[in-house]
Image (tube, rainbow, N blue to C red):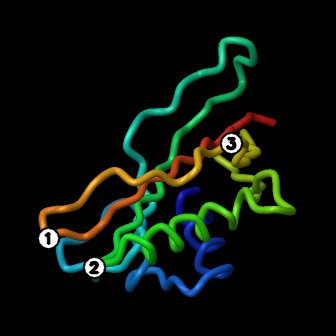
Amino acid sequence: MIRSIATHIENNSDLIIGTTLFVGHRPDTAASNCVALLERSPGRANPMVPTEIQKPIQLLTRNESYSTGWTEAKATYTIFFGRDRAGFDLPVLSSGDSEYYVNIVTGSEPAFIGRDVHGNYEFSCNLMLRISEQ
């Protein structure tokens, strides 16, 4: 699921998985200018819809320049929630006898969260996946 999101980002940006776009973690050897797609908190059940789970995903952008970092973070966010977009649907996933419909239904605008230990600027943007059993 997270890999499908990363592939969508790669196909709609200059980011390259494994070079400037990382999935699941950001290695210590990653370039100063990069984006990481992270799962940092567990999903939660929707009490109103028992067959649905909501799962937060973080887009963490790092750059040597504040303005370039902000621009990259905003561009990545805009892939999902741009002028003509209101979310994104992933392919239907199968597991055993069940099928799951996954879409990104909301997101927070990128925000500056500080500098890393090397002085690079970091921005965070969060996406919410909605996973529904079919």
Would you name the residue on which mark 3 appears? 106
Image quadrant holding the N terminus, namely bottom right
Mark closest to the chain's N terminus, 2 or 3? 2
Contact (Cβ within 8 Å) of mark 1 with mark 2? yes
The answer to whether residue 34 is left or right of residue 105 is left
The answer to whether residue 93 is left or right of residue 67 is right
Marks 2/3: CA distance? 28 Å
Give the image location of residue 32, x and y in percent: 27, 79
Name the element at disc 3. strand
Q: How many marks?
A: 3
> Callout 2: few (<14), some (14-19), or many (20+) C-alpha neighbours within 10 Å?
some
Please say if 133 is above or below 84: above
**Looking at the image, which is closer to me, 119 or 93?**
119
Q: Residue at x 73, y 43 (%)?
A: 105
Image quadrant holding the C terminus, namely top right
Give the image location of residue 95, x and y in percent: 64, 46
Q: Quadrant of residue 26?
A: bottom left
- The amino acid at mark 2 is Ser
> Callout 1: few (<14), some (14-19), or many (20+) C-alpha neighbours within 10 Å?
few
Name the element at disc 2. loop
Contact (Cβ within 8 Å) of mark 3 with mark 1? no
Would you name the residue on which mark 1 appears? 118
Please say if 48 is above or below 21: above
> Callout 3: few (<14), some (14-19), or many (20+) C-alpha neighbours within 10 Å?
some
Give the image location of residue 69, x and y in percent: 43, 71
Residue 32, disc = 2
Extreme right residue here?
A: 84
